[in-house]
Image: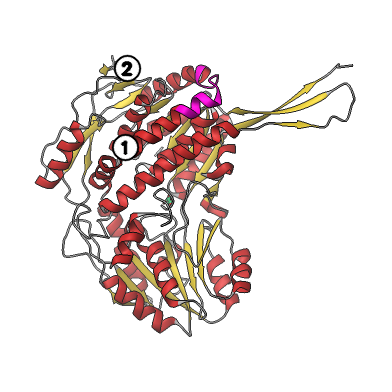
Amino acid sequence: MACFRSVFSTRFPQSHRLFLHLASPLPRAPAHTTAAATPQPLFFIRQINMQAQNVAARLSSSGFLHAQGLVGGKWTDAYDGKTIEVRNPATGEVIANVPCMGRNETNDAITSAYDAFNSWKKLTAADRSKRLRKWYDLLMAHKEELGQLITLEQGKPLKEAIGEVGYGAGFIEFSAEEAKRVYGDIIPSPLPDRRLFVLKQPVGVVGAITPWNFPLAMITRKVGPALACGCTVVIKPSELTPLTALAAAELSLQAGIPPGVVNVVMGNASEIGEALLSSPKVRKITFTGSTAVGKKLMAGSAGTVKKVSLELGGNAPCIVFDDADLEVALKGTLATKFRNSGQTCVCANRILVQEGIYDKFADALSTAVQNMKVGNGFGEDVVQGPLINEAAVQKVESLIKDAISKGAKVILGGKRHSLGMTFYEPTVISDVKNEMLISREEVFGPVAPLLKFKTEEEAIHMANDTNAGLAAYLFTTNVQRSWRVSEALEYGIVGVNEGIISTEVAPFGGVKQSGVGREGSKYGMDEYLEIKYVCLGNLS
Ligand code: SIN
């Protein structure tokens, strides 16, 4: 399956980087801190298999691994000493214990970011740009180790993980370039003795809450433009995958990004979220994750009227018309459906196939899916890793059960993989209806549900019949149809004859309940900027 290896290792094939609960304060105890320049021994490995042990040993010797939070440039434990375990989803083994931080550590991180903001924003754009560029260089120089770390804590196949490093680093490189292009404006004055200017200024301290499915790229996509614009950040990575975030933060220090500009806290999600939301010093919340949590963050931001960017759940339709090129449609569908074992918010969630091509497409898809190798992400030729945890598998199981009880048929898979753990068989099911739960909720697993439609109007209606509006895909060789349908789809991103749409140079984001704001591209910069109008008067 050569095509899979290339499809799953990158986002766009043309470039290496184009692709891819929410609380009383605890008494303040002295922080166990160490200087940023001298990384502490980390990886408190209890039990680990040989393969992962070798990887962990190599990573440890690389000097950029940390199992502590980063507050004001100091590697910091939880003030009460509590820790949480980080596990390898492929084996269940504990890889590391990281601090279980909460309100107090977050408040200190906010203060550090607030203090650092005063000097970071005053650097020239060129200076910020150089440091970001250096960060990009370091991320790329360590792409193999970072990829291994991603596979270790997140589970995705190594090639795909290394692809994520290129994708993620691309946001830093792009932001380094854009830093120099934050232009203002001069407005022709309606009065002769006045001059009107528009300045763009950094928003301030940003709270960045990121998910486990892209442990690096979802951080860089937020932190790159934030820093480029002159903002400082408090990052809360997912507790399931914090090690990549900590390694990236270490590299940011090595790149000359001053202490306090990038802070990382993790642990008690409710306390950390609450501290970020309630602080008037935090001027912006940026979040990638579930729609339910996004709504809470949006509501919680109202108290201090923060700017918000939310990249929330999707329910992507992938429409295959009778006039599609079968090979192109197949390749695109496989890429969008099975990337990261189906665990992305832009993965095809419903595959709508026109009746004339339905049987042929279902056969071809099932044959291709049958050949996908499932296993530990470090295994050779593996293209499907484990799901992130048991809850994820149970969700997939319940959606399939509901679909079958309502008439869907399993063509392939439909059960846990014989490898055990959280491995699930790549699955194709037919006779799915838009009313079934599997068509209403994000599957977030390697399941391709096929729905049949007759007309273009019916496909558009089915595609738009959801509260989500992130990504949609369509496959057709009819140019007029490609325009007509793209315009009719109520989605923030449309892939036409293409299943891989993510890149740092294009705006990523959704409409309806899939979120607000855009990430990446020149549009993503505006999310971290305030517009100030200056009226210069009395000039005559
Ligand atoms: C992507 O960047 O392509 C996917 C992001 C996500 O799943 O949230």
415 up-or-down from 81: above or below: below
Kindly report the distance in space between the C-alpha atoms of the residues bearing marks 1 and 2: 42 Å
Name the residue at 53% across, 63% down: 466
The magenta stretch is: 119-130
Query: Is residue 170 found left or right of 491 in the rendered image?
Result: left
Mark 1 crowd level (few <14, some 14–19, many ≥20, 10 Å Cα)? few
Q: Is residue 168 above or below residue 470?
A: above
* Element under disc 1: helix
**Res. 380 in view:** yes
Residue carrying label 2 = 27
The foreground one among 290 and 216 is: 216
Closer to the camera: disc 1 or disc 2?
Answer: 1
Residue at (47% x, 28% y) in the render:
130
The kind of residue on which mark 2 rests is Pro
Percent coordinates x, y for residue 29 in the rendering: 29, 15
- What is the quadrant of residue 469 in the picture? bottom right
Viewer-proximal residue among 74 and 83? 74
Q: Quadrant of residue 265?
A: top left
- Determine if the magenta segment contains residue 520: no
Q: Residues within 10 Å of mark 2 (few under 14, many from 20)?
A: few
Answer yes or no: disc 1 within 8 Å of ligand 1: no
Classify residue 537 as left or right of residue 311: right
Q: Residue placed farthest to the top in the image?
A: 30
Residue at the spot 41% in from the left edge and 20% down from the top edge: 258
On residue 141, the disc is 1
Give residue 229's position: percent from left, percent from top.
55, 30
Mark 2, secondary structure of its residue: loop
494 to the left or right of 220: right
